[in-house]
Amino acid sequence: MNKSTRFILFLVLLSTAVQAQTISQIKLKELQKVLTTKTDRIQVINFWATWCAPCVKEIPLFEKLKQDNGGVDITLVSMDFDLDPDPAKVERFVTRKNLKNKVVILAETDPNSWIDKIDKNWSGALPATLIINTQTGKRKLVQKELHEGDLEKLIAEVNN
Amino acid sequence: MKKLVVVVCALIAMAASPVKEGLEVGDTAIDFKLKNVDGKTVSLADYKDAKGYIVIFDCNTCPYSKAYNQRIMDLNAKYAAKGIPVVAINANDPAASSGDSFEEMVRIAKQKKYMFPYLVDETQEIAKAYGATNTPHVFVLSKNLKVTYIGAIDDNSRKADAVTKRYVEDAADALLEGKAAPTPKTKAIGCGIKWKSA
């Protein structure tokens, strides 16, 4: 192996190491499946966007929850598509923040036609977080920035 | 006076119950007295000849507000002359969103040459009474402050030239014709209003 091949190999390895998590673009139907499929794991779904300052601020709470509580499924649903359908910004963000949670992009237009199908009490404002016990149908919707301890409290509430 | 008592009672009831807050289509909105970017206070009652109002909760910082900025100016240009002026209100707490200070509101209104008032809802009481949640969030009101439309400006935030449904224009046109808004309520993705921390 000559010097330049080794260098190229090094670059390839480096690029895989910092490669962005591939983020899937999903449709409403797939999101609804997450909200309704019966499982004994509590579903925690956070609606956020890269441009939303309070969203970005609360994301570490979801990362911490993933570490602390293995019994919940967390999905971070990016709503960036509405203003910017190019996923690059979301991918860069996820890479830069080194997010461990599952991130998806909801790739749907005309939000008025589907916001109610996610939760009829949701105004569409970000951030918003849904905590669902799919077994009992109990759900909590929070339409503001979360703070330390809020998620744990909400999870306990839907578990009752 | 009776009306005022009812309104005050309604406000107290709203403040007391966390369940139901804000306006629905068909409700009567309250008037307000808020400081404009020119330092003067503005009320809906100041518009003696208005046939209605397009009240928009907006802000300086939200990318959706920025995306809709020109469209809001265009709405006022089109409908103020017909008797339905735009009245914009910023309820964002500048402590939570520093770009939403009054000084920034003044700067933006000047820079963009707003031809409509841009008011500050410092206590956030008007945003709460109306049930505003997003920016921009529109309430079309009749002359008698009856709510005829609540929601988004149109159905495409990203591209003004790709819009297919102009909800606010349709509501304003209907108001001028004495008809109900064809789509009285819509929802949109947007920035949440930055509430003061309790």
Image (tube, rainbow, N blue to C red):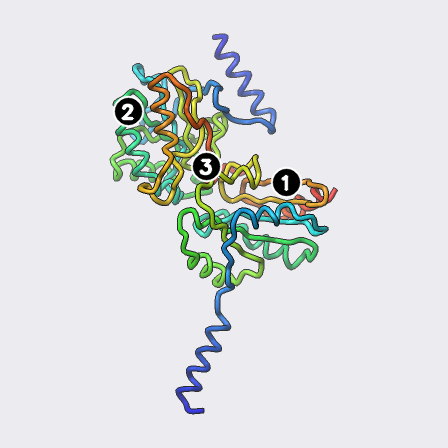
What amino acid does circle 2 point to?
A: Ala
Residue drawn where x is 29% and y is 36% of the image: B109
Q: Nearer the viewer, residue B90 or A117?
A: A117
Does residue A52 lie above or below B4 as drawn?
below
Residue at position x 56%, y 23% from top? B14
| Residue A127 in the image, given as x and y percentages of width and height | 51, 44
The span from disc 2 to disc 3 (Cα, nearest Å) is 23 Å
Q: Which amino acid lies under the numbered mark 1 shown in the image of this protein?
A: Lys
N-terminal of the pair, mark 2 or mark 3, is 2
Q: Quadrant of residue A122?
A: top right
Q: Secondary structure at mark 3?
A: strand
The numbered mark at residue B134 is 3
Both marks 2 and 1 on one chain: no
**x then y, percent, for residue B144:** 40, 15
Residue position for label 2: B80
Identify the residue under disc 1.
A140
